[in-house]
Amino acid sequence: MSRAVVTGAAGFIGSHLVDSLLADGTAVVGVDRRAPHPDSVAAANLAGALGDPNFTFVTGDLKTCSLVPLFRRADTVFHLAALPGVRGSWGERFAEYTACNVFATERVLSACEEAGVPRLVYASSSSVYGTSAGATREETAPSPESPYAVSKLAGEQLCLAHAGRAASTVTAVALRLFTVYGPRQRPDMLIGRALTAALGGPALNLYGDGSHTRDFTYVGDVVRAAVAAGTGRIGTTVLNVGAGVSTSVLDLLATVEELTGHAVPVNRLPAQAGDVDATLADRSRAAALLDWAPRTPLAEGVSRQLSHLTAHAVRP
Ligand code: NAD
């Protein structure tokens, strides 16, 4: 890949993807509506990339900004920009979720076609499945349980609709990401909040009794899958990207306590609408098409996130 565009470049996963592409010698255009000045989280996430002559950062809102000039000559557009998070997607904020996750995705796809970009990689979400009884395969019927999950499924379907047109020149690979964690994780997410609580920050708001399970997936493994999806000789498809390991939230908290040497203080709160009971990836399709397998066990990934948190000020 000689040139790539990453939307959501100032975010958690996007900034790791930018770093990885730059390390491979790819010229990267990063687009995000959060600018490193004045957004300190964006600045911290992009600290490595901003000094790289192969990196261009563009501040822009995908709902309105001119995309075609940014996309020209790109081999791949990685579309990661979105409003993430299940709980905030109910109610009035859904208008913004629809605009950022659905309308903006349509604009990105149209711009890919107009600029002649051959490959789009879209960050979809395991939340499209809803609660699963066991490992979910891509053929499993989606059953989203929150407005956020509906918006991510809609974005995925837009990818398939655009790429499926007879005249389309773009192939689209939608990656259903399963609970991503690691250094720079969004401060609203569980592992960062649990580590922060153990290190003396605010007590962890624990929704439900902690028996619900997640397929926690290390960000470096997700980035390897995204790069493989951006370059692989594959057609339009949907792929699970998950570690394939089921861990309960209580077991995760035990790991955090072991690594930090401190108890995690907890505020017990009722389960929240849209928080599913279980997620777990069947990763055989990603293994077959991308030759991808996760490499980072949970304790190792959480340990890296802990090191990052202690090396940097706890984020607001
Ligand atoms: P993040 O919030 O850290 O990054 C998303 C970035 O997108 C932010 O920097 C934000 O400013 C930007 N953005 C949002 N709307 C925009 C717009 N209209 N114009 C320009 N920029 C905009 O989130 P993340 O955790 O890094 O998630 C990245 C992607 O992965 C999202 O699409 C999310 O839905 C998906 N995903 C994440 C997870 C996870 O566990 N983190 C799991 C499944 C899917």
Image: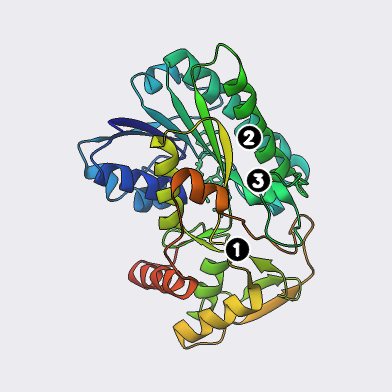
Label 2 – label 1 distance at C-alpha:
20 Å
Judged left or right of residue 76, residue 28 is left
* Residue that label 2 marks: 156
Q: Quadrant of residue 35?
A: top left
The residue lying at 49 percent from left, 86 percent from top is 258
Residue at position x 45%, y 82% in the image = 259
Q: Is residue 95 left or right of residue 183?
A: right
Residue 301, quarter of the rendered image:
bottom left
Task: Determine whether 124 is above or below 253 in the image.
Answer: above
Colour approach in the figure: rainbow
Position in image of residue 214 (x %, y %): 64, 65
Distance (Cα) linking label 3 and label 1: 15 Å
Secondary structure under the numbered disc 2 in the rendered image = helix
Q: Residue at x 50, y 26 (%)?
A: 171
**x and y percentages locating residue 52 in the rendered image:** 22, 41
Task: Choose between 205 and 73: the one closer to the eye.
Answer: 73
**Which residue position holds label 1?**
215
**Side (left or right) of 252 relative to 222:** right
Q: CA distance from mark 3 to mark 2?
A: 12 Å
Disc 3 secondary structure class: loop
Amino acid type at mark 1: Asp
Q: How many marks?
A: 3
Residue topped by disc 3 = 138
Q: Position of residue 174 (x, y in %)?
A: 56, 38
Could you tell me the amino acid type at mark 3?
Answer: Glu
| Residue 11 in view, yes or no | no
